[in-house]
């Protein structure tokens, strides 16, 4: 599915795949990446009081990986500004389907609506996947739904912990956030050129070290009572993501399966939107990803951007 183009930019002096051959001297990605040791990223959790050591590298990630495309092209960083920003630039250059950008640390990680995503070094999965799906613009929310399902099923396969979703893109363990999805796309008019799926999962994060999120966030290790392997979770996630992507390309919507994990449906909620606060009952989320809210006076409003409280 990769697109044949010539490339003049490199993220840094990596062991690069053939589609990225070119001159790295003045690439835009080099300014974005600022990686200390690209290519191999080591994970030590001594800072959080948990003893586990893993290396994230193209070799260790692909070892035992059974996918056709997801994660077969890998770029690893010890530290990077934002995996999504690097991935968008590579996508514009024509990086093939399933290219994985992953980092031990992000210095400018992003959540929805420009929010920061903070994770101490080596504690989380911080990654982006480049895709070139044949989808209409109205079908783009399906990418977030499919990615959420892949993350949820991967966590459950590794840990046995039940996973739920909070609209629009939060991954929950118990009632606390342990991850999120950020989908960004490139469009030419109404034509989808590429999609970048940013995935962040708190794997071995000690949330008590970050008081400002301790009440609302958790990690797999916190809920499991022991550290978890980022590599194992990543390989399973890539396998499940490929399965979800295949279904999507065959025209199957993940909407109904995604809805079965969604919290707060039928509850009275307050939603902070760009135009102010809306209150009412969360009736459903439609196939386009919009929250359908029934106000106290019985009127219905579709909300495409907002935060549920």
Image (cartoon, rainbow, N blue to C red):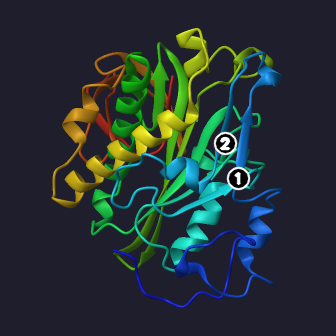
- Residue at point 27%, 69% (across, down): 134
What is the x, y in percent for residue 78? 75, 50
User: How many angstroms separate mark 1 from mark 2 (CA)?
Assistant: 7 Å
Which corner quadrant of the image does residue 219 belong to? top right
What is the x, y in percent for residue 291? 34, 37
Of helix, strand and loop, which one carries label 2? strand
Marks 2 and 1: in contact by CB < 8 Å?
yes
Crowding at dot 1, Cα within 10 Å, few <14 / some 14-19 / many 20+, comes out as many
| 25 left or right of 15 in image | right
Which residue carries the number 1 mark? Answer: 40
Is residue 211 in sight in this rendering?
no
Which residue carries the number 2 mark? Answer: 55
- The residue furthest top is 225
Crowding at dot 2, Cα within 10 Å, few <14 / some 14-19 / many 20+, comes out as some
Q: Tell which of 29 and 53 is nearer to you.
A: 53
Which corner quadrant of the image does residue 192 belong to? bottom left
Q: Tell which of 6 and 253 is nearer to you.
A: 6
What is the x, y in percent for residue 169? 45, 38
Q: Is residue 65 above or below residue 299?
A: below
- Residue at point 34%, 37% (across, down): 149
- Residue at point 68%, 40% (across, down): 117
Q: Earlier in the sequence, mark 1 or mark 2?
A: 1
- The residue furthest left is 251
């Amino acid at each position: 599915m990769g697109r044949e183009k010539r490339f003049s930019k490199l993220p840094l002096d990596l062991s690069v795949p053939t589609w990225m051959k070119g001159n790295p001297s003045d690439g835009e990605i080099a300014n974005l990446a600022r990686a200390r040791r690209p290519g191999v990223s080591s994970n030590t959790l001594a800072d959080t009081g948990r003893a586990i050591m893993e290396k994230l590298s193209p070799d260790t990630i692909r070892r035992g990986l059974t996918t056709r495309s997801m994660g077969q092209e890998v770029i690893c960083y010890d530290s990077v500004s934002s995996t999504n920003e690097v991935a968008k630039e590579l996508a514009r250059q024509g990086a093939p389907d399933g290219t994985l950008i992953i980092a031990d640390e992000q210095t400018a990680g992003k959540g929805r609506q420009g929010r920061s995503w903070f994770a101490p070094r080596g504690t989380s999965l911080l990654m982006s996947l480049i895709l070139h799906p044949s989808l209409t613009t109205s079908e783009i929310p399906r990418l977030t739904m499919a990615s959420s399902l892949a993350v949820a099923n991967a966590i459950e396969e590794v840990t046995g912990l039940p996973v739920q979703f909070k609209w629009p893109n939060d991954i929950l363990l118990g009632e606390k956030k342990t991850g999120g999805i950020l989908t960004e796309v490139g469009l030419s008019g109404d034509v989808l050129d590429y999609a970048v799926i940013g995935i962040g999962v708190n794997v071995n994060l000690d949330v008590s070290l970050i008081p400002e999120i301790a009440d609302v966030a958790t990690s797999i290790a916190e809920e499991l009572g022991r550290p978890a392997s980022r590599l194992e979770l990543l390989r399973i996630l890539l396998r499940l993501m490929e399965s979800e992507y295949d279904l999507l390309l065959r025209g199957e919507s993940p909407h109904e399966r995604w809805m079965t994990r969604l919290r707060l449906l039928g509850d009275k909620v307050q939603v902070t939107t760009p135009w102010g606060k809306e209150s009412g009952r969360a009736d459903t989320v439609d196939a386009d990803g919009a929250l359908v809210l029934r106000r106290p006076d019985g009127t219905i409003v579709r909300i495409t951007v907002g935060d549920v409280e």
